[in-house]
Amino acid sequence: MKRIIAVASILLGLSVCSFAQTSSASPVDNGKALMNPFMGWQIYYYSNVLDNYGSKLEPEDTVDEFEGAGVVFFRLPWAFIETEKDKFNWEIIDSPAQRWVEKGYQIAILVTSTENWTRQGTPQWVYDEGAKYYEVDGFIEPEYNDKKFLKAVDHFVSALAERYDGDPKVAYVGVGNFGMWGEGHTVLTTPKHGKEWGFSTKKKYIDIYAKHFKKTQLVVSDDIADPYIRQDHFKITDYAFKKGVSLRDDSILVQPYPNSWFHDGLAQQFWPSMPVVVEHEHYIPSVNRGAWDKELLLKAVEDYHASYLSIHWHPHVEYEGNKDIIPRINRRLGYRLQLDKAEWPSVITKGEAFTIKSSWKNGGVAPCYNGGYPCFTIKNSKGGIVAVLVDSNLNVKDLQPGKPGEAPALSTECEFTVGQIFDNPLGTYSRVVQKGDFQIYFSVGEIDGTPAYNLPYDGCDGHKRYLIGNITIK
């Protein structure tokens, strides 16, 4: 029997030993890309312009070859969503989102008020109601500190939050409505009308979004501080951090090295507790400018401890040009939960306590912010669940990332009983549990044992549980 177990274990990429009634296993990471919540590459469906970039895909095309993608990003002008006051065109987001949502993707949203490819990003009705604005090279920029404009933004964000806040299908929402393309900077506009937008103005937009979005993660562009100054702290990003708003870098690889990016130092404040988003420059313009470097793209993931990385071009084109670096990035982007080793008794007795020991690592660059708990599930030969054993002593959000291959391990052990026996004056009772030989699987998920994360191992049962070995109940 042990010989059969050993052969099966080799096929599953496990190292399993069984001595003196104790079994152990050290699963081998299969190196594959993972789709998990709140991490991954993000496909740009709209990049401001309505035909950039995923919007050009056929309705059935979900770019399945781009492994590691898990988010679809919608950045578009406010004018295309609230076409008239209190009349919202949510279909512009929800319709294309569904083709990816049904495959397990999340979405992200950023709404803009100023564009340079169309006359205005702000709906005309806002200006008709008296909000102030400026003419800049043929397009309109709002007076960002105008009370009527701020009131309209607040009203819109309230509606946006009513629809999307707390929706588990939404990975994050960007603090928008301020600056060119919603990126928080006005370098193309402010000098032309002599305005400077200080801390007091910028914080109003963070406050509006934070007031309405109580559950969904918010992010703000690094450019709201300054696009080019290298600092680890700015007053406005410190404020964002205190409000629970994370960082999004717009963008890297715009210029060649050594100016490939400016704010990896700034990201160090955010990544230990909140996911960081990295957007790269439009892919082909970056290539044509001599700024694109695949190794630097991977380095940016490391330096920023990025949870999300953009696909900022037509996704099939970007994939074909970078399919050699994408698997390497996938092994590091976000979190990567790994079972380092597990030990369990080869034989357990119904109603008697036993212990399972395990150690875990995070092979990615960022924490698993939502957390979860290790679980060991005993199943019979037909796949039926006999017992679910959750180790609540370890929350995987505490697993810290490290350099490649150097992630620290956390060990845990927990006592369990299968078929607890209850005695009372009327008799002895126990949950009905079969005796015999069973298989044991491991997973990570909710406190009740529901698996939540894909793990980098073979032997999956189709429900995010992974075969680790055998166990006998007597």
Image (spheres, rainbow, N blue to C red):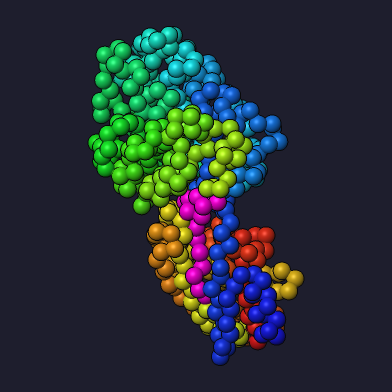
Question: In what quadrant of the picture does the N terminus appear?
Answer: bottom right
Residue at 25% in and 29% down: 199
Residue 179: quarter of image: top left
Front one among 195 and 449? 195
Residue 83 shows in the view: yes
Residue 334 falls inside the magenta stretch: yes
Q: Which residue appears at 55% of the width and 42% of the height?
A: 322
Could you say which is closer to the camera, residue 446 or residue 29?
29
Residue at 41%, 63% (x, y): give it. 407
Horizontal and vertical percent for residue 23? Answer: 57, 82
Q: How many marks?
A: 0
Percent position of residue 216, x then y: 46, 42
Does residue 170 show up? no
Q: Is residue 326 magenta?
A: no
Q: In the rendered structure, which segment of residues is drawn in magenta?
A: 327-342
Instruction: Name above or below for residue 233 compared with residue 400.
Output: above
Nearer to us in this view, 330 or 369? 330
Q: Is residue 310 left or right of residue 254?
A: right
Relative image position of residue 78 (x, y in whole percent) = 48, 22
Say which residue appears at 55% left-offset and 79% top-offset: 24
